[in-house]
Image (cartoon, rainbow, N blue to C red):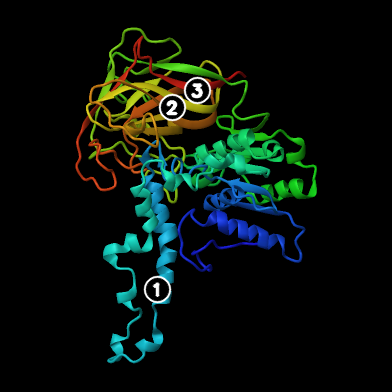
Amino acid sequence: MIFEDVRGRYASEGEWSPFRNESKDGYDSVEWAAALPYSAGKVGMFGGSYVGATQMLAAIVRPPHLAGICPFITGSNYHDNWTYQGGAFEQWFNESWTSLALAPDTLKRAVTKHADVLTGTRRLPLVDYPLFDLERLPSQSNSTQSLAPYLLEWLAHPSYDDYWRSVSIEDHFSEITVPALHIAAWYDIFLGGSLRNYTGIKAHGGSEEARRGQRLLVIVGGHAGDGPKIGALDFGPASKFDGDETTLHWYDYLFKGAQNEFASGKPVSIFVLGRNQWRQEDEWPLARARNTRYFLHSTGAANGLTSGAPGQVGQGALSLVAPTAEKPDQYIYDPSDPAPTIGGPLCCTALPTGIGPQDQRSAEARSDVLVYTSPAFAKDTEVTGPVSLDLYVSSSAVDTDFTGMLVDVWPNGFAQNLTSGILRLRYRDSQEKPEPAIPGKTYHITLDLWATSNVFLAGHKLRLEVSSSDSPRFDRNLNTGEEQAHSTRVVKAKNVIYHDSTRPSALIVPLVRQ
């Protein structure tokens, strides 16, 4: 087993630049390891998050002796589902990852480099001994440029362009020729990418061995924490996961031919929320799941929770019956007072409002959050697979955001977030070519809410939240259409959701028969 610091990090020399050097360096590292005297010539890689990225980026350049990978909770595209999502900047992740994980090592290296003790010993008086040569350290006024220039690069490339395309895994699935165990996680910030890596290589991998050799394991937590206690919920003893043991089993199977769960089991294993049990499946998404439309309904007042009994809501409803003539719902989105992030898939530290599953009722009480709720289920009802939101919208602004969240409402009113998504309106047709909206014009848009596997137990309700902000998980859209990275001007937007016979907005969920 070999542990390696990538270029420019910790004990490794060179300059640190995320993603840019990992394919070339990964190729060299694999081939070096394969040539060691004790090597049998098969090299496997493993690890999570960015260490998953190093595996994927190495795999797309096909080192001859790479024989398997085990990427854990990692992305498939470092624009969408890492730095941006639906065109919105992943602000909390990007800034906390940079501040808490990346820049401190860069600063430490600079301090070590510019600590000139010998020269300092000649300074008089003795009380003026300089700990560091501060004039040669990155200046405080330009610390981002000096310590984290990549953050400015990410902001300078909000659209999907050649800067991102050159390191995209999704654009190179056909170049990957090795088996892989993909470990994803509900409530993980890279859930969408982990699932796309599995389905993408299985469908488009560059060899029969790769296409047949993909495995998927979906745990709960990931960057949101280890089970059984994650966020506000305890998912029971079955949710405990030993990543090291699982990795060893994978390579025992792949390299030694061990007849373990990877040899005899089905290719997909998922942890089903609600029942908090493991289940094996033949494929992902599930072929037997039936995409079902829950249509949005109201008389024009789905804004927030009302006073009264716990969990009581306004007029917003979800139903399998399509709407006819109904008033649209509308709200004022004010970037100066955005709807807050409460839990959810975060990294690299929790917000004061928590991480993972949390009670969403305080957000649902806001007038700029539309709440649509189904009747209580009479029997257990399972939703497993990709979830999307089909909306007909308009805005008074030339650009704004729309967010959606799938929620499991417990009988006591606890509103458990399951999965969510966002779309920046300028990217409604393309991540590559943003286009301003025409104020007042109706647009038909689709939000990717990623996926879940959750059994809504009898007595629970299905709920959808629609808003225009999820801050600070995502940057606030200032509604001006100006460049987000440098704009400071803020305008309010009146945003409208239509649900009638010609504009039937709907939540689309995959129902699984019990």
Q: Residue at x 43, y 51 (%)?
A: 349
Label 2 Cα crowd, 10 Å radius (few <14 / some 14-19 / many 20+): few
- Front residue of this view, candidates 446 and 314: 446
Q: Which residue is mark 3?
A: 509
Q: Which residue is mark 1?
A: 111
- Front residue of this view, candidates 181 and 435: 435
Horizontally, residue 457 falls left or right of residue 470, namely right
Type of the residue with mark 2: Asn
x and y, in percent, of residue 244 in the image: 65, 52
Picture quarter with the N terminus = bottom right
x and y, in percent, of residue 18 in the image: 46, 55
User: Pointer 3 and pointer 1: residues touching (CB < 8 Å)?
Assistant: no
x and y, in percent, of residue 232 in the image: 46, 40
| 3 or 1: mark nearer the eye | 1
- Front residue of this view, candidates 219 and 444: 444
Q: How far is the residue under mark 3 from the one under mark 2?
A: 24 Å
436 in relation to 138, above or below: above
- Front residue of this view, candidates 209 and 87: 209
Q: How far is the residue under mark 1 from the one under mark 2?
A: 54 Å
| 3 or 2: mark nearer the eye | 3
Say whether residue 312 is visible.
no
Type of the residue with mark 3: Val
Say whether residue 89 is visible.
yes
Element under disc 3? strand
Q: Earlier in the sequence, mark 3 or mark 1?
A: 1
Q: Which residue is mark 2?
A: 412
Label 3 Cα crowd, 10 Å radius (few <14 / some 14-19 / many 20+): many
Q: Residue at x 63, y 47 (%)?
A: 70
- Taking the view exactly as shown, the residue that stands out farthest to the top is 324
Picture quarter with the C terminus = top right
Type of the residue with mark 1: Val
